Image (tube, rainbow, N blue to C red):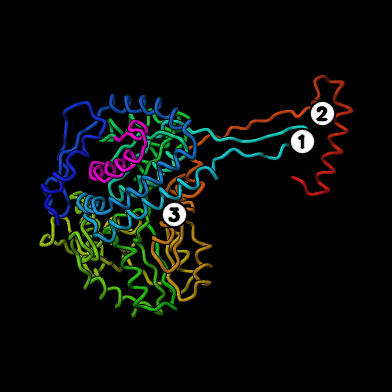
């Protein structure tokens, strides 16, 4: 694994791309050792306003460049992402504490999202004719106008892939972006941005700012023409309120307490392997990872034994190769949160089936993947999102009880169903109150389906990223209707009697031929 000093030397100039006029810098640690990885410039409210002013000017030319030019640039960026994958993998691991394999998922996702939006933007957003209310008399078409300068707030946990899912469709739609990167994930985002700048995106079309939520985050939501936010439900509500007051749109992917249902016809070993990854990829620090497992009592013994055995023998580490199964928590704050949830649960009667210990012998914020049983409603871990290293296991009598339990949450982001019958799993999936469901997988099936919308129900958010829906976030539809001259509309009261009779006849004829 590269030492922090070596990494700093390799990527030293990336931090200079942050829009920051002052001299304030803060140390950013690497989870693998706790040492300082680099010092990151901090932006001010004035820097944010300046970034938006420049972005709005640059956006006009970027929008006029047209779909073909933007497609060419984005596809070039796609190729650069793949060419620079080793650097991107190193940065993701150094900043987040992920394993190499889980970092690779991010890089591959960024490339997929870029390719999809480059090739889909014109098809989704080109102007097209719409049926007029009075055919032949009126001609109507709809065109899409970019919303302008978009504000994107990206968290630390999946900095690269989540940046791509919001920033790239905005660029493809002809918008400019001012992005607030979390300090812990800023270098990964800046390296991704550098690939797009090198591919031909003007620097001021995608600006990155860093700093506190109170100053930089508030300024961004004050200035943006549209807001994308990924983070906690509490913060998301505040952003939604501000966006509502300003009458600008927002897409918000918020918290989750995601459930997995394990039916009685699974292969226990396979289900255990899928469950372990679904719960503890990125050490559970993923909005769509599983924190609640509902397993049918008839298979619970064999499944639990297999799950405990798999996690007990899992390899923890931060090596820059593919030797580790699970990585580190991202910060001391994350370790404190996991520890607090665990201690509260144990004090109130929960039992640790596997894990439950920090591992400072590996790194300062490593924690063993932990499965709890005997979790009850008075425990914090029962309903509150832990976002790291703990999942709870519950026994159910049948599919009906499992569905009811899975839906008994204020959140509705993601769910998973493990079953020996895909048809049975589909029936269960149709009844789950969530934005996405994965069958015989934890989250990657839907997460990688970039042509399909991704987002949450209930308290897990508003709006959708990915797919046509993800592109349509960033444009305003404009309806343009023209009179054809075949028949004028009434201009005076005396024109209506004859025209009304004709219109009634036309409506009846259209109904008869089933014409909309």
Q: Quadrant of residue 216?
A: top left
- What residue is pinned by disc 1? 134
Spatial separation of the CA atoms under disc 2 and disc 1? 10 Å
User: Between tags 2 and 1, which lies in front?
Assistant: 2
Q: What residue appears at the point 37 percent right and 50 percent down from the top-left corner? A: 255
- What residue is pinned by disc 3? 412
Q: Is residue 337 visible?
A: no
Q: What residue appears at the point 89 percent right and 28 percent down from the top-left corner? A: 498
Whole-percent x and y of residue 237?
Answer: 40, 40
Left or right of 465 on screen, residue 188? left
User: Between tags 3 and 2, which lies in front?
Assistant: 2
**Residues at badges 1 and 3 in contact (C-beta under 8 Å)?**
no
Among the two numbered marks 3 and 2 on one chain, the one whose residue lies closer to the N terminus: 3
Q: Is residue 190 magenta?
A: yes
User: Between tags 1 and 3, which lies in front?
Assistant: 1
Q: Quadrant of the C terminus?
A: top right
Left or right of 214 on screen, residue 510? right
The magenta-colored residue range is 182-208
Q: Is residue 21 visible?
A: yes
Among the two numbered marks 1 and 3 on one chain, the one whose residue lies closer to the N terminus: 1
Q: Secondary structure at mark 3?
A: strand
What is the chief secondary structure element of the magenta stretch? helix
How crowded is the residue under tag 2: few (<14 C-alpha within 10 Å), some, or many (20+)? few
Q: Secondary structure at mark 2?
A: loop
Whole-percent x and y of residue 252?
Answer: 41, 43
Whole-percent x and y of residue 103?
Answer: 28, 56
How crowded is the residue under tag 1: few (<14 C-alpha within 10 Å), some, or many (20+)? some
Mark sitting on residue 487: 2
Q: What residue appears at the point 81 percent right and 46 percent down from the top-left corner? A: 511
**Residues at badges 2 and 1 in contact (C-beta under 8 Å)?**
yes
Left or right of 310 on screen, residue 29? left
């Amino acid at each position: 694994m590269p030492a922090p000093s070596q990494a700093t030397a390799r990527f030293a100039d990336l931090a200079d791309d942050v829009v920051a006029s002052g001299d304030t810098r803060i140390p950013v640690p690497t989870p693998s050792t706790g040492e300082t990885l680099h010092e990151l410039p901090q932006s001010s409210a004035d820097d944010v306003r300046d970034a938006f002013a420049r972005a709005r000017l640059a956006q006009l030319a970027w929008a006029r460049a047209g779909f073909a030019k933007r497609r060419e640039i984005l596809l070039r960026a796609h190729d650069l992402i793949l060419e620079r994958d080793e650097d991107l993998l190193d940065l993701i691991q150094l900043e987040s504490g992920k394993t190499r394999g889980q970092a690779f998922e991010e890089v591959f996702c960024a490339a997929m999202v870029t390719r999809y939006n480059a090739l889909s933007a014109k098809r989704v957003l080109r102007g097209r004719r719409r049926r007029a209310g009075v055919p032949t008399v009126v001609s109507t078409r709809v065109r899409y106008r970019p919303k302008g300068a978009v504000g994107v707030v990206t968290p630390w946990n999946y900095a690269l892939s989540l940046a791509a899912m919001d920033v790239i469709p905005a660029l493809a739609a002809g918008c400019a972006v001012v992005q607030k990167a979390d300090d812990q994930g800023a270098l990964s985002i800046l390296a991704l941005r550098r690939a797009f700048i090198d591919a031909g995106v003007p620097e001021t079309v995608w600006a990155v700012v860093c700093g506190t939520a109170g100053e930089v985050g508030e300024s961004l939501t004050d200035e943006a023409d549209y807001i994308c936010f990924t983070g906690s439900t509490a913060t998301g509500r505040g952003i939604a309120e501000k966006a509502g007051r300003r009458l600008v749109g927002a897409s918000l992917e918020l918290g989750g307490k995601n459930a997995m249902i394990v039916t009685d016809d699974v292969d226990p070993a396979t289900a255990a392997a899928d469950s372990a990854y679904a719960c503890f990829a990125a050490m559970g620090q993923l909005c769509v990872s599983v924190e609640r497992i509902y397993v049918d009592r008839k298979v619970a013994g064999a499944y639990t034994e297999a799950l405990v055995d798999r996690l007990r023998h899992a390899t923890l580490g931060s090596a820059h190769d593919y030797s580790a199964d699970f990585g580190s928590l991202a910060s001391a704050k994350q370790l404190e949160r996991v520890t607090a949830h665990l201690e509260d649960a144990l004090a109130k009667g929960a039992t640790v089936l596997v894990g439950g210990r920090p591992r400072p012998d590996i790194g300062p914020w490593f924690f063993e993947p932990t499965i709890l049983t005997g979790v009850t409603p008075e425990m914090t871990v029962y309903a509150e999102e832990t976002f790291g290293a703990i999942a709870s296991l519950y026994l159910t009598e049948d599919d009906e009880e499992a569905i009811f339990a899975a839906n008994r949450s204020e959140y509705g982001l993601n769910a998973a169903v493990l079953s020996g019958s895909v048809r049975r799993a589909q029936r269960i999936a149709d009844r789950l109150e969530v934005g996405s469901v994965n069958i015989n997988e934890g989250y990657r099936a839907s997460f990688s389906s970039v042509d399909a919308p991704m987002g949450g129900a209930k308290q897990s958010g508003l709006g959708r990223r990915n797919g046509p829906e993800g592109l349509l976030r960033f444009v305003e539809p404009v309806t343009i209707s023209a009179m054809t001259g075949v028949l004028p509309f009434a201009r005076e009261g005396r024109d209506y009697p004859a025209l009304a009779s004709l219109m009634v006849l036309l409506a009846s004829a259209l109904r008869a031929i089933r014409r909309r």
